[in-house]
């Protein structure tokens, strides 16, 4: 399953995803991963959440991110939830360019039983159809 927290820049999406991650981690049976472009959320996240600073792994493309996630899953079968914050900033792209990433996460979710929660910025007019179906 993929959930997208969508809204204009500055509307509190990061706070929402951090709160969801913390809430989820309190009841999770498996591993919860939070991928961000920095490690600034280290003290905001529950101690059971594995924070991944994407800038430390040279993730510069959608393919890089998908391969990184697959590598994490190959090494740890207990990952059940992955939170991703600020993907467009990490990749320096527009949300409409992320079809490969969303399609890939959909396959990973179905094949490995992993849930994703992602933040995405933009106006309702900019919301691509391939993302709209995942918006809360």
Image: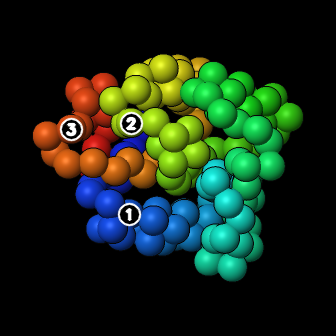
Q: Is residue 44 above or below residue 92?
A: below
Q: Earlier in the sequence, mark 1 or mark 3?
A: 1
Disc 3 to disc 2: CB gap under 8 Å: no
Label 2, on which residue? 94
Label 3, on which residue? 126
Looking at the image, which residue is at 85% across and 34% down? 75
Looking at the image, which residue is at 47% across and 43% down? 88
Label 1 or label 3, whichever lies nearer to me, is 3
Looking at the image, which residue is at 25% across and 30% down? 128
Task: Please give left or right for residue 108 compared with residue 130 in the image.
Answer: right
Label 2 or label 1, whichever lies nearer to me, is 2
Q: Residue 62: where, in percent of width, then height?
A: 58, 27
Q: Is residue 47 visible?
A: yes
Q: Residue 132: where, in percent of width, then height?
A: 25, 35
Q: Is residue 136 above or below residue 97?
A: below
Secondary structure under the numbered disc 1 in the rendered image: helix
Determine the residue located farthest toward the front in the rendered image: 92
Q: Is residue 16 above or below residue 37?
A: below
Q: What's the mark number on residue 13?
A: 1
How many angstroms separate mark 2 from mark 1 (CA)?
A: 17 Å
Q: Residue 65: where, in percent of width, then height?
A: 65, 32
Disc 2 to disc 1: CB gap under 8 Å: no
Q: How many marks on residues?
A: 3
Display coloring: rainbow
- The image quadrant of residue 7 is bottom left
């Amino acid at each position: 399953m993929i959930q997208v927290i969508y809204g204009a820049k500055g509307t509190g999406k990061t706070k929402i995803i951090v709160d969801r991650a913390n809430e989820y981690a309190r009841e999770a049976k498996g591993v919860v991963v939070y991928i961000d472009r920095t490690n600034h959320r280290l003290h905001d996240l529950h101690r059971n959440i594995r924070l991944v600073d994407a800038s430390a792994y040279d993730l510069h493309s959608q393919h890089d991110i998908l391969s990184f996630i697959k590598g994490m899953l190959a090494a740890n079968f207990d990952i059940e939830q992955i939170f991703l914050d600020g993907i467009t900033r990490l990749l320096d792209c527009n949300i409409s360019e992320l079809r490969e990433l969303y399609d890939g996460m959909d396959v990973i979710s179905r094949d490995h039983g992993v849930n994703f929660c992602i933040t995405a910025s933009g106006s309702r007019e900019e919301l691509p159809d391939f993302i709209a179906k995942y918006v809360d």
